[in-house]
Image (spheres, coloured by chain):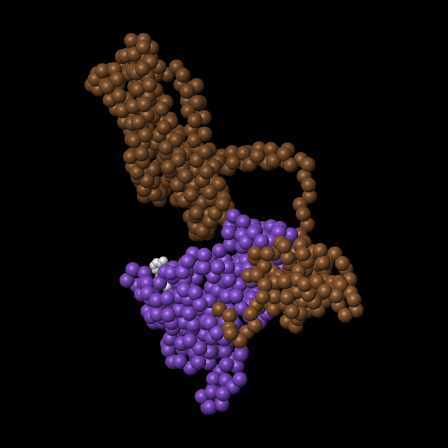
């Protein structure tokens, strides 16, 4: 199988501040990969590199097997139609209503009539659990949680195979973030999406990810399952996963017991 | 990019056939997802619509290889937004059709409004009235805050005022000099032709002197400053509104009228008269140089004749205009900046409106000055 994302030998530098040093990452189809790391460790920057919004100083990024650097504009444009991105702040177009925001990518294709666009937008609003009466509102009149969900609807409207989520549950109340997680999980099962997300939220991380990539010291210090991640004794991991909050989230899914089983040679699952 | 083992994904296709019991049937096959439909959605939809005209048709969707919400919605719309009675679906494709029926309950359309034009006219009047009220309110607020400031003069925003004077005044010296000089030259050339015809060469001094010092200098400087600093002030306040910086100031108990608006108004009221003197001076130099080449009047005799031609009170009038124009520009710019809504579109509209309104206000104020001071400073010697 061709990996959906293949990052090889990536270096990123701002001035003389090195953010990534020889970083490698491979994501296979259908995987949910969570990117974690301290604030300022370069998670957003890595995502922007994969999206082609920034150029790496060195190294290559391939998406769907196609290198982003050195490919023709049309080819890169084609890749861009196959992924959906949820930006950290939503990035809804503030001059457009909720409806027009979601309709924009569809209309841009010029393949569907307005009746189709309207029904599709309504379906996507249902999908992300936004009432239809909000469709005519402007983004400035919405709460942060609603903006996130509408931005997700916009990211999903072209049925992407690959979805990027930057801090999808940050700023949502626990109830909403729970339903957001359920939403993403059901979408993943239904559409066999590949998901790459940046998150600080342990509950989201633990309940969604197949693989966890821990970004520290300018590279991925761990890339593997949750159990593999927590078995590494790095100060960031110890702080992040095995602090009070981490233990609570982990014990909720029983990852600790499994971890203990594994160390006694009794592989769970 | 296909795997060797997997069957190739085919283009979406509709085939018409007959079911075992003789009923008409339609079979869909291939990929019905966005990638495949992007280029042929319209033709497939109309094809499906024709077939759907027969309500008893059997629909076989079990041979569809790939389906997504886009494909499902397209098929469902062709069916007339309901499921046919006789439908065979592939296992796992049911989910794409499961929530479609709720899409039919669409949002109600806006009712027809016969009085739209009247309503629009009324809205424009109301908005104009609201702007007027807003500006008056702003002036009142500033006056109240200035009284507080008078009692604690040390707490005044002196630094902000000085920074603003530098920004709106000093940094505008170049552009006002350039425009003023060129206007002086152009005006001088134009008048020289006419005056030569009457042999009234020496009156170029009166013409340029009065025209520039009394009218053109103040108006040109004000228009330039409105475009340059007025838009900047509106944009700055607008961005602060968008990013909630204004609200942050308010909740800290720092009134933004004192910190942000008063300094700008004071700074423009200080800088504007000085800029007008500067612009008029440079324009006169340009005019004198052009008069020298066109009419042979030496620069020295031009400037020594100037005090007789233009009574000194005109300078004071120009300075007075400067104070009023500067205050007006800053007031209008701040008013529109504060009214920006937190979105990018509103920021653009606010900035445009600010510049247009402040230039209009300057011209109106200039007309008012012309009427009030019609018999001041005009000597007919
Ligand atoms: N455009 C930029 N110019 C300079 N430095 C940047 C830029 N973007 C990010 N950085 C720096 O790169 C580092 C990683 O940033 P970021 O990827 O946003 O971190 P996070 O992991 O919190 O998302 C930070 O130290 C940040 O200051
Ligand atoms: Mg970030």
Location of residue A109 (image quadrant): bottom right
Tell me the residue at 33%/69% (across/down).
A21
Asked if residue B261 can be seen in this view, the reply is: no
* Residue drawn where x is 58% and y is 59% of the image: B37
Q: Is residue A73 left or right of residue B304?
A: right
Residue B109, position in %: x, y?
A: 67, 47
Q: Residue furthest right?
A: B21
| Residue located at (70% from left, 56% from top) | B49
The residue that appears at 32% across and 40% down in the rendered structure is B167
Would residue B124 be visible to someone looking at this image? yes
Residue B75's place in the image compared with B245, above or below, is below
The x and y percentages for residue B344 are 48, 47
Q: Position of residue B114 (x, y in %)?
A: 68, 36
Specify the colour of chain B. Answer: brown
In the rendered image, the quadrant that contains the C terminus of chain B is top left
Based on the displayed image, in which of its 4 quarters is residue B177 positioned?
Answer: top left
Given residues B328 and B288, the one toward you in this image is B288
Looking at the image, which is closer to me, A82 or B12?
A: B12
Number of numbered discs present? Answer: 0
* Residue situated in front as seen by the camera: B261 or B50: B50
User: Residue B161 at what x, y percent from top left?
Assistant: 34, 40
Depicted B111 relative to depicted B315: above or below:
below
| Picture colour for chain A | purple
From this view, report whether residue B176 is shown above or below residue B46. Answer: above
């Amino acid at each position: 199988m061709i990996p959906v994302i293949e990052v090889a030998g990536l270096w990123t530098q701002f001035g003389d501040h090195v953010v990534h040093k020889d970083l490698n990452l491979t994501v296979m189809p259908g995987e949910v990969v969570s990117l974690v790391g301290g604030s300022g460790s370069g998670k957003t920057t890595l995502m922007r590199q994969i999206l082609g919004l920034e150029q790496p100083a060195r190294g290559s990024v391939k998406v769907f097997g196609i290198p982003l650097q050195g490919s023709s504009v049309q080819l890169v444009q084609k890749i861009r139609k196959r992924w959906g991105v949820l930006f950290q702040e939503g990035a809804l177009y503030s001059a457009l209503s909720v409806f027009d925001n979601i309709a924009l990518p569809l209309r841009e294709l010029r393949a569907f009539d307005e009746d189709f666009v309207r029904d599709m937008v309504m379906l996507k609003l249902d999908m992300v659990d936004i009432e239809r009466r909000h469709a005519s509102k402007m983004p400035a009149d919405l709460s942060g949680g609603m903006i996130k969900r509408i931005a997700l609807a916009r990211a999903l409207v072209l049925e992407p195979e690959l979805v990027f989520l930057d801090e999808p549950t940050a700023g949502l109340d626990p109830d909403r973030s729970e339903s957001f997680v359920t939403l993403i999980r059901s979408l993943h099962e239904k559409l066999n999406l590949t998901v790459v997300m940046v998150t600080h939220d342990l509950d989201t991380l633990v309940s969604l990810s197949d693989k966890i990539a821990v970004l520290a010291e300018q590279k991925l210090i761990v890339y593997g399952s949750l159990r593999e991640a927590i078995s590494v004794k790095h100060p960031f991991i110890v702080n992040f996963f095995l602090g009070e909050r981490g233990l609570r989230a982990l014990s909720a899914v029983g990852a600790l017991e499994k971890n203990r089983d594994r160390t006694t040679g009794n592989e769970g699952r | 990019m296909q795997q060797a083992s997997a069957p190739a994904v085919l283009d979406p296709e509709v085939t018409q056939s007959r079911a075992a019991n003789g009923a008409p049937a339609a079979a869909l096959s291939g990929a019905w997802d966005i990638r495949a439909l992007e280029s042929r959605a319209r033709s497939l939809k109309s094809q499906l619509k024709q077939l759907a005209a027969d309500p008893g048709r059997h629909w076989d969707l079990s041979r569809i290889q790939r389906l997504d919400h886009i494909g499902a919605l397209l098929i469902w719309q062709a069916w007339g937004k309901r499921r046919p009675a006789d439908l065979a679906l592939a296992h796992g494709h049911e989910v794409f059709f499961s929530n479609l029926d709720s899409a039919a309950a669409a949002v109600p359309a806006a009712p027809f409004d016969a009085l739209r034009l009247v309503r629009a006219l009324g809205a424009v009047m109301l908005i104009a009235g609201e702007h007027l009220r807003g500006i008056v309110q702003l002036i009142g607020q500033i006056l109240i805050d200035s009284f507080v400031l008078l009692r604690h003069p040390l707490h005044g925003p002196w630094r902000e005022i000085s920074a603003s004077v530098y920004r709106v005044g000093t940094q505008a010296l170049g552009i006002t000099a350039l425009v003023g000089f060129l206007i002086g030259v152009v005006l001088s050339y134009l008048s020289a032709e006419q005056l030569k015809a009457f042999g009234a060469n020496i009156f170029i001094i009166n013409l340029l002197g009065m025209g520039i010092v009394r009218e053109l200098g103040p108006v040109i400087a004000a228009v330039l400053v409105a475009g340059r600093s007025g838009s900047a002030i509106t944009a700055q306040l607008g961005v602060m509104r968008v990013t909630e910086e204004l609200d942050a100031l308010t909740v800290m108990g720092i009134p933004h009228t004192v910190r942000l608006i008063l300094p700008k108004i004071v700074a423009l009221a200080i800088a504007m008269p000085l800029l007008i003197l500067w612009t008029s001076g440079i324009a006169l130099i340009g005019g004198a140089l052009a008069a020298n080449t066109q009419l042979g009047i030496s620069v020295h005799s031009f400037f020594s004749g100037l005090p007789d031609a233009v009574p000194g009170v005109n300078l004071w009038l120009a300075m007075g205009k400067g104070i009023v124009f500067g205050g007006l520009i800053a007031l209008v710019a701040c008013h529109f900046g504060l009214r920006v809504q937190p979105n990018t579109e509103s920021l653009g509209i606010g900035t445009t409106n600010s510049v247009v309104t402040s230039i209009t206000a300057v011209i109106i104020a200039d007309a008012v000055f012309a009427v009030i001071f019609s018999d001041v400073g005009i000597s007919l010697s």
